[in-house]
Amino acid sequence: MSDKSEKGFVIWFTGLSGSGKTTISHILIEKLKAAGKKVEALDGDVVRTNLSKGLGFSKEDRDTNVRRIGFVAHLLQRNGVVAITAAISPYAEIRDESREVCEDFVEVFTKCDLDTLVGRDTKGLYKKAIAGEIKGFTGVNDPYEDPKNPEVVCDTNKETPEESAEKILKKLEELGYIKTAQV
């Protein structure tokens, strides 16, 4: 298979809670499936419930969780599946490790400012973290390291989820992972 558009690849979403990772990934999943691609989603919350049950939120546990996501994404990708991950994955070193494991890797940073995230937060977790009621909340009192060179930056303060998905599809086409006629 020399044609990239016939291979599996990984779309790795990273960004703070509420930044749009899951919403945008769902749009991509539908478009890629409609184009005949085999697609699997590895959502951070779902993986934590099933594959990483029992892990906490220490740096070590977060790293273990992200490594597991990267391993499964690699297994899917090498078997011709488009693996779409949507997990905060706060630490650059572990994201870079996943990039090394997964041969065809497209990092998507869902960038969003804290005020917008607080406004979107229906559970009030950001407000509780800001008030000190929740410890270790990524982006408030636990670090999040912005990606240095993601293939795509979706500024979800300014873009609709559909606009962000289109931006990602254009980049996938530019990189040779999909063809215009497919999507």
Image (cartoon, grey):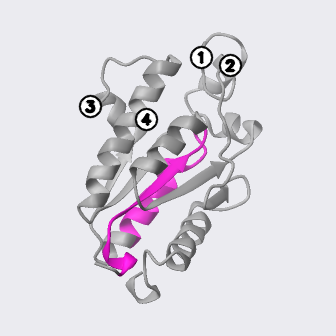
Q: CA distance from mark 1 to mark 3?
A: 22 Å
Nearer-N-terminus badge (4/3): 3
Quadrant of residue 68 in the image?
Answer: top left
Instruction: Write down the region rendered in magenta.
Output: 3-31
Q: CA distance from mark 2 to mark 1?
A: 5 Å
Q: Which residue is mark 4?
A: 66
Q: CA distance from mark 2 to mark 3?
A: 26 Å
Nearer-N-terminus badge (2/3): 3
Indicate the secondary structure of the residue bearing disc 3: helix
Residue type at the position of mark 1: Gly
Q: Nearer the viewer, mark 2 or mark 4?
A: 4
- Residue in front for this viewpoint, 178 or 116: 178
Q: CA distance from mark 1 to mark 4?
A: 17 Å
Left/right placement of residue 155 relative to residue 27 reads right
Where residue 39 appears, as percent x and y from the top left, is: 30, 62
Q: Which residue is mark 1?
A: 136
